[in-house]
Amino acid sequence: MGHQEQVIPLMTPYKMGQLELSHRVVLAPMTRCRAYGGVPQPHAAVYYSQRTTRGGVLITEGTSVSDTAQGFPGSPGIWTQEQVEAWKPIVDAVHRKGALFFCQIAHTGRASTNDFQPHCQAPISSTDTQLSPDAESGTVFSKPRRLRADEIPGIIDDFRRAARNAIEAGFDGVEIHGAHGFLLEQFMKDGANDRTDEYGGSVENRCRFVVEIIDAMVHEVGANRIGIKLSPFADHLDCADSDPLALGDYMVRQLNKHERFLYCHMVEPRMAIVDNRRQIPHGLLPFRTAFNGTFIVAGGYDREEGNKVVAEGYADLVAYGRIFLANPDLPKRFELDAILNKYDRSTFYTQDPVVGYTDYSFLRDDNKDDLAAQG
């Protein structure tokens, strides 16, 4: 009896701004490549609603802010009215089950090819340095074109308009994709940004573009509807920084300038393997301490580590990616300490509307008592 009454930190309620959550398990944004022609499809409503629980939080896959923002096959957008209308029933499906839904808005920048760009033009970036080919996918990225300073306000406006469109589609808020080597990181990180104008050089200059995007979006939809994902320690897509602590600290303090800025979603430094077990470095504490709003962590967390960081106050919420992809009822499995489905990496980015997308199994309700007893 005592075991069943034990408090599971991940399953405790939380108030994010004015939003009431019933647990701390967040569906992380994940590229799934199931849209057609930039338009999200009805099977996305199945996928997201499968992973919905009352009082939970879901974040969409990266959603393009414009026709220059695309870099993957099957990625959805939110810059046209057709896309906005297509998102509405998907958002409704999540809301009907009582969850909160955030749209991650993104621009791939140089992590793209001419084929994805309007009129086969060069992808845009902070730099004209070409990315190394991607060994896993075999993608050979095209040489980018360095944005002129007078073009940057137009990209900022794309983000502002995407935020407005997301709210029109019914989303509860938007997450700015400022991580993993996409356009915003191509400006923020000194390993990619080689500019000599007001958008390059010092950390303040390199972050200027992102800060201006945040300012425009706050003015458009309100700070209480905006979060951001940052990965200062990561080096994805040739985007590394020589001083990630200074970069993360600067950005967090910029977020704090907006009263009620909703959340900061940060990616842990790379995991180490110690005694055959993954060890998460918990390197985000300085940012957690400095940030005024809700702090979401991501980066290889399991149930045990997630419970630990919530219990210790290191994080408010924990975002789960691949294991949530493979376990649509992940919060229930965490509650019962049930066995998890294994994910199939080979179907992460295929475009089948069912296989590897909506066909992962749920716990059977009639096994619930048995599973609890085993726990």
Image: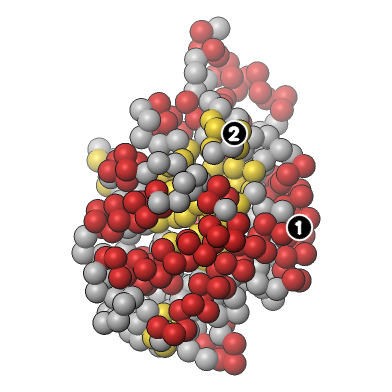
Identify residue for label 2.
21
Q: Is residue 349 left or right of residue 84?
A: left
Q: In this view, does 284 lie above or below 339?
A: below
Determine the residue located farthest toward the top in the rendered image: 1
- The label shown at residue 88 is 1
Q: Nearer the viewer, residue 211 or 374?
A: 211
Q: What element carries label 2?
A: strand
Q: Quadrant of residue 174?
A: bottom right
- The label shown at residue 157 is none
Q: What residue type is labelled 1?
A: Lys
Q: In this view, does 301 lie to the left or right of 78?
A: left
Q: Quadrant of residue 217?
A: bottom right
Residue at left 51%, top 8%?
2
Residue at left 53%, top 57%?
218
Q: In this view, does 116 lie above or below 362?
A: below
Question: Is residue 335 visible in the rendered structure shown here?
Answer: yes
The picture places residue 361, in percent across and down from the top left corner, at 66, 42
The picture places residue 167, in percent across and down from the top left corner, at 67, 57
Q: Which amino acid does label 2 sit on?
A: Leu
Q: In this view, does 286 lie above or below 128?
A: above
Question: Is residue 282 visible in the rendered structure shown here?
Answer: no
* Coloring basis for residues: secondary structure
Residue at left 55%, top 47%?
224
The picture places residue 17, in percent across and down from the top left corner, at 54, 39
Q: Along the polypeptide, which appears first: circle 1 or circle 2?
A: 2
Q: Is residue 274 above or below residue 78?
A: above
Distance from label 1 to label 2 (Cα)? 22 Å
Determine the residue located farthest toward the left in the rendered image: 242
